[in-house]
Image: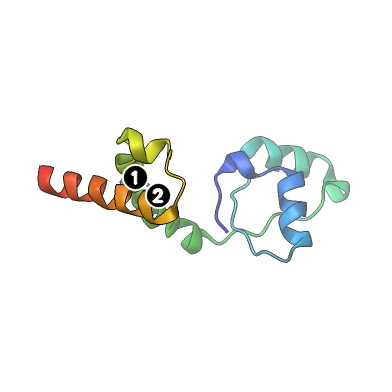
Amino acid sequence: MCGDKAYSSRRNRRYLRRRQIKHTIPEPKNQKVNRQRRGSRGGRPTGFDSTAYKRRNAVERCSRCSNVLKGSRAVATPYDKRAYVFHSTVTLAAIRLWLRY
């Protein structure tokens, strides 16, 4: 799991560690300074894989596509009771976007 610096709280990290989910979340400067100021009581530095964090960009670009689809009111607020009806609504919205470009 990759996350922004906003998700870098001890609580979030502890939650992920307890469930054995590997995570890549950068540590904000203020947290790093506070941890180092505490010395040995501050704990170990967080594990951070910069190459995995850079791959997060592809996912964010993909989520932009879904945000464009949510420009359609029917997709943004699904009023459909059945999944196949909502699927057709999303398909129609995608076709409309495709024809526009």
Can residue 101 be seen from the camera position used here?
A: no
The residue depicted at 59 percent of the width and 57 percent of the height is 24
| Residue 74 percent coordinates (x, y) | 34, 37
Q: Nearer the viewer, mark 1 or mark 2?
A: 1
- Front one among 97 and 42: 97
User: Residue 96, how many percent across, how many down?
Assistant: 17, 44
Colour mapping used in the image: rainbow
Drawn side of residue 27 relative to residue 37, left or right: left
Task: Name the residue tied to disc 2.
Answer: 60
28 over 21 or under it: above or below? above
Q: Are marks 1 and 2 in contact (CB under 8 Å)?
A: yes
Q: Quadrant for the C terminus, please.
A: top left
Q: What element does badge 1 sit on? A: helix
Give the residue furthest to the front: 81
Residue drawn 62% across the image and 38% down it:
29
In this picture, residue 58 sits left or right of residue 94: right
Name the amino acid type tagged 1: Arg
* Residue 22 position within the rendered picture, expressed as x and y whole percent measured from the top left: 64, 64
The amino acid pointed to by label 2 is Glu
Q: Residue at x 66, y 44 (%)?
A: 8
Please give the name of the residue rendered at 60% of the width and 51% of the height, measured from the top-left corner: 25
Q: State how far apart marks 1 and 2 are (Cα).
A: 6 Å
Choose between 41 and 54: the one closer to the eye: 54
Residue 34 appears in which quarter of the rendering?
Answer: top right
- Mark drawn on residue 21: none
Q: Name the quarter where the N terminus is drawn.
A: bottom right
Label 2: element kind: helix
Q: Which mark is residue 64?
A: 1
